[in-house]
Amino acid sequence: MQIKKDFIKVGARIRPQTKIKATHITVHETANTGKGANAATHARYLHNGAGGRSVSWHFTIDDTEIIQHLPVDEMGWHAGGEGNQKSIGVELCVNQDGNFNKTKENAAWLVRYLMKELGITIDCVVTHKHWTGKNCPTRLLKEWSAFKQLIAGEEPSKPSPQQPPNNSDSIGTVTVKAATLWVYDRPAWDARHKTVKAGEVFTVTRKLDVGGYDMYQLKSGLYITASTKYVDFKPNGSGKPIATARKSTVRQASATAQKQTSLTTQTLRARRPYPRGEHVRRVQQALAKLHYYPDKGAKNNGVDSVYGAMTADAVRRFQSMHGLVQDGVYGLKTRAKILSLL
Ligand SMILES: [Zn+2]
């Protein structure tokens, strides 16, 4: 591996130039699963001022390269007061078009290299969570000891086998209504496994309550939301054969695809009276599909057909990640970039 030095400019707001002598290495994940959210994209993001946020770190790693943004004797802003003063910040990319296993190997190589260069011991390789309690690095926290073994160069012990699929009788089928939807590998809302698309049909073996919300367990052993907002459930023996349901939902899915390519060519900006309507909703849905949510965690993740401050902010985040002018205005360039990624 090589380390590509591409430092944030001296004098930039996010490069405070405070000298440190790092005793720790802090491991993070970018939490940006968008396509193309690789190391080069994050380098550009930092060069562009990090979208106005007070964040910076030392290295970003993806499945093909390592980029260094700060000298190792200067402080970054990535792990809270003590963490910033004591540690080198290392960010692993989690872009959906990257190979995360390769990214992990590259990160392990870098951490091993930094430990040797800076005289840091394996005990002082820590997570962002260690300093501030933040749930970061989300994926690696679940396999932290295996990752440390990877750093140490040991063969990580095999992960425990997945629970065998539940072969009990099906209680019905579930059809995905949302354009894309997560399925989970455990009955837990943070156990995201992969996304499925509108029109896909799965066999359900049971319904269960997970933290106050219902989930279906699927015959495949995976789990999916039972919210009627996102899926249609059809109990066994309820008339319409599954084949019919499948056909009609395939039509729905292709209609969804068509909608995505019919994004408005109107310019949208968050100025009163706020633009609203179906054309705004389509833009919001497209952004959400690329993981830029107007209001993550809120109802419909903020997809509300109104182009207000939250949507402008999602557009600004999207623009800053893709080298566009960060004005929060949806115009033809932003539209073209969105369409190229859908
Ligand atoms: Zn972090």
Image: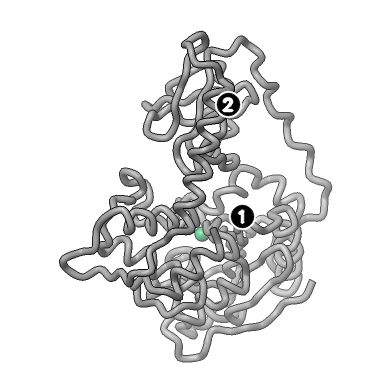
Q: Is residue 24 visible?
A: no
Within 8 Å of ligand 1, the CB of disc 1?
Answer: no
Give the alpha-carbon distance from disc 1 to disc 2, as whole Å. Answer: 23 Å
Quadrant including the C terminus: bottom right
- At label 1, counting other C-alpha atoms closer than 10 Å, the crowd grade (few under 14, some 14-19, many 20 or more) is some
- Give left or right: position of 48 versus 146: left
State whether residue 63 is above or below residue 144: below
Within 8 Å of ligand 1, the CB of disc 2?
Answer: no
For marks 1 and 2 on the same chain, the one whose residue lies earlier in the sequence = 1
Residue for badge 2 = 202
Residue for badge 1 = 96
Q: Where residue 317 sits: x, y (%)?
A: 42, 67
State whether residue 96 is above or below residue 231: below
Q: Where residue 232 sits: x, y (%)?
A: 44, 27
Tell me the residue at 69%/71% (across/down). Answer: 66
Q: Where residue 22 sits: x, y (%)?
A: 59, 72
- The reply to whether the C-beta atoms of the residues labelled 1 and 2 are less than 8 Å apart is no
Tell me the residue at 38%/75% (across/down). Answer: 52
The residue type indicated by label 2 comes to Phe
Q: Nearer the viewer, residue 119 or 294?
A: 294
